[in-house]
Image (cartoon, coloured by chain):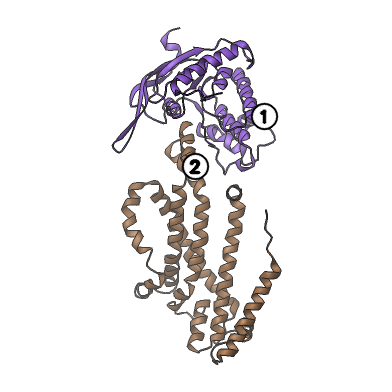
Amino acid sequence: MTILSKEIIVDSLTKIFTQGKSKLEVLKDLTFDVNKGEFICIVGPSGCGKTTLLKIICGLEEPTYGKVLIRNEPPNPIKHRFGMIFQEDSLLPWRNVIGNVKFGLEIKGYNKKESEEISRKYIEMVGLKGFENYYPYQLSGGMKKRVAIARALAIDPDLILMDEPFADLDAQTRSLMQRELLRIWFGVGKTVLFVTHNVEEAVFLANRVIVLTKRPSRVKSIINIELPYPRNRLSQSFISYREKILKLFHEEMGVSEFGT
Amino acid sequence: MKYHINYLFSFLSIIVFLILWHLFSIIINIPYFPSPISVIKAILEIALIGDVDKYTLAQHIYVSVERVLLGFSIAAITAIPLGLIIGIKPLIKDTITPIIEPIRFIPPIAWIPLAIVLLVGITRYIFIIWVGAFFPILLNTIAGIKRTSNILIQMAKSFGSSRNQIIYKIIIPSSLPEVMTGLRVGLGVGWMCIVAAEMIGGEPIGLGRLIIKYAGLLRLDVVIAGMIVIGIIGMLMNYIILAIEKRLFKWRQEIIIT
């Protein structure tokens, strides 16, 4: 594969936040690349700058040194189509479900009829048919996340960026959402960058898992998960991948309490 | 848990208040101090027969409400856009704040001499009410804009929103509840300025003017009648806007309650 066919190139990326006189180096010399259609999970200790990395990749933050290229160009949210799913609730509370899903389409300049049609399609895809007119306050955490996913997918993104999207969901909903996400990914074949601190989740979802060190973060290791989908969490090979990554994780944390 | 208003107790408290007032008027025994009965009589007298200039209570109310709504509307039209600009542009905020901050602590009554010298006719009423209503609307609008969630702005940017799209699709809708609160408080304050405004208006009509007219005649029964009517109308206007707020911002009300 030539370098031109890479979807994302992260090259010697360094990010330093300055607040007054104090400097906080969050990312240091981060280098990796992502192929088109890949599902990449990024794991790392909390506070290691995973969110910052996603924000730089979708152009919300500027790198201090180094560069990020999306299809050989600097990230540009107007030109590139980013489907960013934030860790926090990012739904517009004054819009109902369909109004929220339409938001990205409005920004991308779709007309009313198109955005209505597309929104309904994706609402159905995330399993929220019948909830079109509900407002965010009437939805559970898992449903809100689905709306955010539908909103991101509706614009037909080149790249889906997910920042610990399932972190505040209960175990059951979480596992359901993971399977749903894989189903959607198989359907649309998008490139996905998925940040999590949950190793089991990463092994369950990803083609490749990028393990970051603690702050200032570098790439500690990149692991190919050569397991067919759907993956069985109880299989020996699944567990050995999980243990392998957890071990890397523990080396970083210096503690052993970090579980799945 | 939902709490239901106990109407019986609300009603009883009014009755008890009127009885205490009545006893107080008997005890102090000053002929100018009216009992509740004479105030009720005064209300009926003004409502049915009219005042010394033959204006009825309904006419007084109509004229005052009209003046306040006029001044209030102009306050809304001026304060909301200014608040929006101040909220969005830090440089304009820094420029305007040193002028606005001291001015907002000047009571509307203190503006009366200026209004008398510089203005004529209805513009005097409008000016005084505008001064009262302007600042609550302005400050709440600015507060609403400041409270816009950063994550929503980032979300909009990640889709490639322009600056204007962020203003119109995120900042303005998210600050509307505060703007509405500002309108409600502004209307209340504007209404409370009615007596001050009508002191200088010259025309013999309006609730404030009614009070001033009868104060000169030492008819405190009519003065208190006018005060009560002003209080009740202010309360009703507040209820109306509260009801609108509840309807429009259901998404927000529920967030606050739960």
Tell me what hue chain A is rendered in: purple
Q: Position of residue A242 (x, y in %)?
A: 55, 16
Q: Position of residue A215 (x, y in %)?
A: 39, 26
Question: Which residue in the rendered view is the most extreme toward the left?
Answer: A21
In this view, the residue in front, A134 or A50, is A50
Tell me the crowding category of disc 1: few under 14, some 14 to 19, or many 20 or more residues within 10 angstroms, Cα based: some
Image quadrant holding the C terminus of chain A, namely: top right
Quadrant of res A137: top right
> Chain letter of disc 2?
B
In this view, the residue in front, A152 or A229, is A229
Q: Which residue is mark 2?
A: B170
- In three-dimensional space, the C-alpha distance between marks 2 and 1, rounded to whole angstroms, equals 27 Å
Q: Is residue B241 left or right of residue A253?
A: right
Q: Which residue is mark 1?
A: A127
Q: Which chain is brown?
A: B
Q: How many numbered discs, if any?
A: 2
Q: Of the residues shown, which amino acid type is indicated by label 2? A: Ile
Image quadrant holding the N terminus of chain A, namely: top left
Is A63 rendered above or below residue A239?
below
Q: Residue at x 58, y 85 (%)?
A: B24
Q: Residue at x 37, y 71 (%)?
A: B111
In this view, the residue in front, B9 or B46, is B9
Q: Are marks 2 and 1 in contact (CB under 8 Å)?
A: no
Question: In what element is the residue under mark 1?
Answer: loop
Quadrant of res A203: top right
Question: Which residue in the rendered view is the most extreme toward the top?
Answer: A1
Q: Position of residue B210 (x, y in %)?
A: 52, 81
> Chain letter of disc 1?
A
Is B203 rendered above or below residue A151?
below
Tell me the crowding category of disc 2: few under 14, some 14 to 19, or many 20 or more residues within 10 angstroms, Cα based: many
- Residue B236 in view, yes or no: yes
